[in-house]
Image: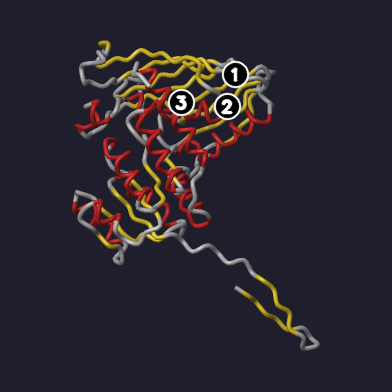
Amino acid sequence: MIETSSTSSGATLTAARPVSPVPPRLGFAGVGWIGRNRLEAIAHAQAGEVAAVFDPVVEAAAGIQRTWPDVQCVGNFDELLALPLDGIVIATPNMLHAEQTIAALRSGKAVFCQKPLARTGRETRDVVAAARAADRLLHVDLSYRFHTGMQRIRDLVASGRLGRIYAVEACFHNAYGPDKPWFYDSRLSGGGCLLDLGIHLIDLALWCLDFPSVKSACGHLNCRGALVRRDSGAVEDYAAAQLSLANGASVQLACSWRAPAGCDAQIGVTFFGTEGGASFQNVGGSFYDFRAEHFLPDRSRRLLSEPPDAWGGRAAVAWARQLADDAGFDPQIAQLSAVAETIDRIYGRSA
């Protein structure tokens, strides 16, 4: 857009004013709780146009249309792909993520997918390869990366103020379990609480440390107190794992569904370095409120962030805004292959 103005002498000055990117037209596959939450975040931030939705639960899609009357509701995923859209937000069951994401990318659309991107490392690599081949933007909803506290901890680590990080301890204990039957069938879900919750812990540890390679990974998986047999088809409701990283750091993590932890949730990641530490912990058993702190060598602590922090939909908004500027392939998505392959190793699955 060009702005003009006149001086007192009558001369005309012409100045260029930056033109705001046109918000991308977006389709949404799956608008249950998490899908609707991400849709609302994008809409309220005016980062994208909510153009179309698909959900096999007709009432879920109709609920979106009641709030956004101009939204087009379609009957299946293929109809969504056939529309003139710039990108698709996928919030469907795990077993559909890879297939639907690859189909969307090949149709020329960018994708924002719920985690996990796929059930296995092999599927994850296939999806990343499809994004690269199509030169389309692909992001995954690893939402904890976008909390102010986690970003400040990552900055602390990168600055060297914690010294050399030699250990990370992380947990995600959820007093509840998933309410959909497919979560409990490993063929459909790809795994249990490790894939559902532990993926965040592994991602945060590797992301903050700039993705060093994982030298070894082993774990202990339980279902209702008994070891999970690989050939049983069951999924774990408790997982403990240890990773050894190429930079010399060790990562210990534990996660669970329906843990008797005395609260709704225990969620935290703590980094130990030779010059200090940093911790990201939920407050009062909350799923949404977190406090981040910097631990100094003199045993004092410094507050990095505290509630409130509206972090939940930031990953989706960031994707939509990046799509408005540049719809091309983002090489950083390849980091997700390292996370998925690490989970495979904990599960004892071959590459």
Q: Secondary structure at mark 3?
A: helix
| N-terminal label among 1 and 3 | 3
Q: Is residue 43 left or right of residue 280?
A: left
> What residue do we see at 20% from left, 17% from top?
232
Query: For mark 3, what is the residue?
Result: 202
Query: For mark 2, what is the residue?
Result: 209
Residue 95 at what x, y percent from top left? 27, 35
Are the two marked residues, 1 and 3, in contact with CB atoms closer than 8 angstroms?
Answer: no
Instruction: Identify whether 5 is placed above or below 318.
Output: below
Residue 313 at what x, y percent from top left? 43, 46
**Alpha-carbon distance for marks 1 and 2?**
9 Å
The residue carrying pointer 1 sits among few (fewer than 14), some (14 to 19) or many (20 or more) residues within 10 Å by Cα, namely some
Are the two marked residues, 1 and 2, in contact with CB atoms closer than 8 angstroms?
Answer: yes
Q: Is residue 57 left or right of residue 107?
A: left
Please state which amino acid type lies under the numbered disc 3: Ile
Please state which amino acid type lies under the numbered disc 2: Leu
**Alpha-carbon distance for marks 1 and 3?**
15 Å
Instruction: Identify whether 87 is placed above or below 22.
Output: above
Here the colouring is secondary structure
For the residues carrying marks 1 and 2, which lies nearer the camera in this image?
A: 1
For the residues carrying marks 1 and 3, which lies nearer the camera in this image?
A: 1
Instruction: Identify whether 127 is placed above or below 167.
Output: below
Nearer to the camera, 145 or 284? 145
> What residue do we see at 28% from left, 55% from top?
80
Are the two marked residues, 2 and 3, in contact with CB atoms closer than 8 angstroms?
Answer: no
Nearer to the camera, 73 or 301? 73
Residue 142: assigned label: none
